[in-house]
Image: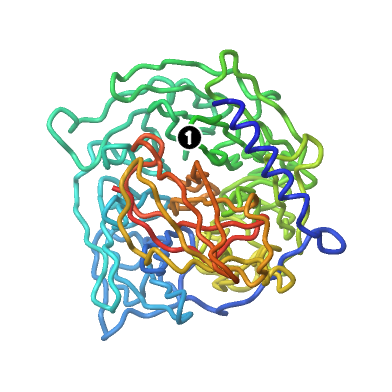
Amino acid sequence: MMAKFIGFLVLVLLMQMMIPKAAGAGGGKWNLLRSNIGVSAMHMQLLNNDRVVIFDLTDFGPSNISLPNNRCRDNPNDLTLQHDCTAHSVEYNVATNSIRPLYVYSNVWCSSGAAMPDGSLLQTGGFNDGYNTVRVFKPCNDASCDWQEFNNVLTHRRWYATNHILPDGRQIIFGGRDRFSYEFYPKRSGADLAIELPFLRATRDPTIENNLYPFVFLNVDGNLFIFANNRAILFDYVRGVVVRTYPTIPGGDPRNYPSSGSAVLLPLQTGGVAEVLVCGGAPKGSFTSANNGNFVAALNTCGRIRINDANPQWLMETMPLARVMGDMVLLPNGNVLIINGAGAGTAGWTIARNPVLTPLIYRPNNPVGSRFEAQNSSSIPRMYHSTAILLRDGRILVSGSNPNAYYTFAGVNYPTDLTMETYSPEYLDPQFASVRPTIVSPASHSQLGYGQQLTIAFTVQDTSINTDFVTVTMVAPPFTTHSFSMNQRLLLLSGATTTSLGGSNYQVRVSSPASKILAPPGFYLLFVVYQQVPSQAIWLQLN
């Protein structure tokens, strides 16, 4: 099995080498979609109808978009504006480039969430009257859907917590400010109470909680990899025991909020290696220093660890650009995009400087020393409370940046930014149009079982492709906030066999994921990738 995996990595590396590089420092293209979406994009989730749910916070005054039909929010618990006729959440329609205001009642500030197996967004916690609240947004193809809220559902207050989907379809929710526990939702018999996790208490720095929004990933053995501050464990949530403790990341600097690095689980293949990549952040003490007017340079290192090795160790790499509050996005070809953020300071109101406008591509299968490449820069600073997510067509949706407590558009270093733009990676450049696959079948929103054979028909303009260089990937769209994408997962489907059907027509046969541990149930984006150039995806529901 390991020999097959190594062979696969060699194949991927060869495909990467075949792609012509743009002149200068990388490629890609930026495009402004909207100059004002009405709310600051603190949280984002792509749903299976190609709509994006976006929201920021209440308790800090009006947004920049009104609720429809003269509707207002009357909330006596609001700390600033009890009668508020503006929306604090919107739905973005990718196809029409349009915005629809949504009604959220309780405060969703610095909350968490993930998409459920049925495609609904389950969203948990927040601040003030949102501490113990659960919210559900069920996607629809008209304007009939909106937030549903359920008060006093969570056992513990969850503010700056992290959610992850489990193989049984439930979500597990870890931590939060002054909370060193986890709990499950939906609730079931025997799992209604919060359970203490001493690791979360042990990783809290004495002077500042540098372990908020912990990085959580479902491992291929069914346990959860949890990284908080500068340490990590492998946690058996079924038995409630720590089964492995990992070395402290070299240098010992914190990587979680408010030091706010980012992390991804690198692409998975059945029987392959599970690796976690943690990049950027701020050195220990940076939060206190920034609040005193001293903006310490961000970290320029990444740590990478094979979490199932007999003796796992961190491999450290150096990024071309130091970055705090960056976002890491798994691209459909298996590369990692590192985008947004600042070069100094930390997360928090007004305490970061030097916006980093240049994204990086990280190619995990390249040799060490040749994995990073700078891309074309944006002109818009994306500081505190920025987000970035993958869309079905392969573009990256980028929005947010509000390092101010209120919507502030003048008189500050970094005004509130309500623009929305896309970054189109180099694989969408016109020069690659002839090798970009187009999926013909199955139809989008088809259902797929575990361990099944799947035949995908596709076309490529170039009628002389090398079928050895076709791969198929599945991506779980994450819930993204505060530099971490919860439930982000990319699978390289195994057994790919591609045949020509004549002319520009081809088909590829692959095996779907073998278990719910490898790929929890839910909606995934399925891409056909040729020479690192992905098709537009189709939605598949895995159950």
Rendered image coloring scheme = rainbow
Q: Residue, x 35% and y 40% (percent of image)?
A: 451
Q: Position of residue 129 (x, y in %)?
A: 27, 52
Mark 1, Cα crowd under 10 Å, few <14 / some 14-19 / many 20+, is: many
Q: Position of residue 268 (x, y in %)?
A: 52, 38
Quarter of the figure with residue 541: bottom left
Please identify the residue farthest to the right as the structure is shown: 24
* Number of numbered callouts drawn: 1
Please state, as top left, top right, bottom left or bottom right, where the N terminus lies in the image: top right
Is there any visible trace of residue 393 in the rendered image? yes
Please identify the residue farthest to the bottom as the structure is shown: 69
In this picture, residue 226 sits left or right of residue 412? left
Is there any visible trace of residue 413 in the rendered image? no
Q: Position of residue 269 (x, y in %)?
A: 52, 37
Q: Mark 1 = which residue? A: 270
In this picture, residue 263 sits left or right of residue 220? right
Please identify the residue farthest to the left as the structure is shown: 189
Secondary structure, mark 1, is loop
> Mark 1: which amino acid?
Thr
Quarter of the figure with residue 229: top right
Quarter of the figure with residue 139: bottom left
As drawn, 322 above or below 424: above
Q: Nearer the viewer, residue 490 or 344?
A: 490
Q: Nearer the viewer, residue 14 or 400?
A: 14
Q: Position of residue 24 (x, y in %)?
A: 87, 61
Q: Nearer the viewer, residue 496 or 266?
A: 496
As drawn, 161 above or below 314: below
Q: Residue, x 34% and y 68% (percent of image)?
A: 81
As drawn, 429 above or below 496: below
In this picture, residue 464 sits left or right of residue 160? right
Q: Residue, x 72% and y 52% (percent of image)?
A: 360
